Amino acid sequence: MKLPQAGTTALITGGTSGIGRATAKSLAELGIHVIIAGRSVERGEQAVKDIRDAGGKADFIAADLQDEASARTLARKAVEVGEGHIDILINNAAIGSIAMTHQTTESVFDQVMGVNLKAPYFLVAELAPLMAERGKGAIVNLSTMVAELGTSALGLYGASKAALNLLTKSWAAEYGPSGVRVNAISPGPTRTEGTVEMGGMLDQLAAQAPAGRPASPDEIAAAIVFLATDSASFVHGAILPVDGGRTAV
């Protein structure tokens, strides 16, 4: 793997646990200054402490992403903490929704779309132009294999991520000519704190893939780090499946 240049700064939303925390740890091990954003101050401070104790550079910003204002506020705070620049944006924060369409309320619909789609949209709107001015940058969006499959009770979640997939390609077209690479990871079932509520459904989904098991957060983080660093210098607008082969069969 090509190591990034000194002074690289990354913002990871939803970085206090699961895939986000594993990604922050991995990026910090490469010498990247990681800025972790999340709702839990306790988890955020612990994630930062763990990285610093290991010799890395990390900071935490408390953020409850849900709309344009919260996204732009986080972006501006991150630029300040990042000493004037963010070189890598990992749009990882998301909320799931497991419910049939007729059971879904408008408030849940708005919440899912707000966190999963609106917040990344305006984080990119705020940060991608700054990256373009510097002539470099990388954005990695966290999607899901459910965006490619018709899955009962996961339609809303999948739809929010399918829209993010399209935006990934649009942003690559918009900002790629200015040196900003935009790609997405499409994970399969992953065992994290956030998927505990799925219970046996997680294993059932995983059993349908050739790998036959859920992923660990570190396995997903490895793919994110690849797209976020110069190892993927010629990759633009890709939706990389990291789903144990589920969408291949």
Image (cartoon, rainbow, N blue to C red):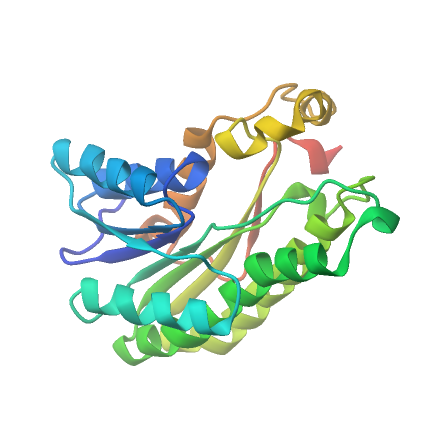
User: Which residue is at the front of the view, 233 or 216?
Assistant: 216
Q: Is residue 152 left or right of residue 178?
A: right
Q: Quadrant of residue 153?
A: top right
Coordinates of residue 77 in the picture (x, y in percent): 27, 67
Name the residue at 22% across, 47% down: 3
Q: Is residue 184 left or right of residue 58?
A: right
| Quadrant of image for the C terminus | top right
Name the residue at 36% across, 71% down: 73
Coordinates of residue 80 in the picture (x, y in percent): 20, 69
Q: Is residue 16 above or below residue 198?
A: below
Name the residue at 74% across, 24% down: 208
User: Which residue is at the front of the view, 64 or 20?
Assistant: 64
| Quadrant of image for the N terminus | top left
Name the residue at 78% across, 42% down: 99
Q: Is residue 135 above or below residue 47?
A: below
Q: Is residue 56 visible?
A: yes
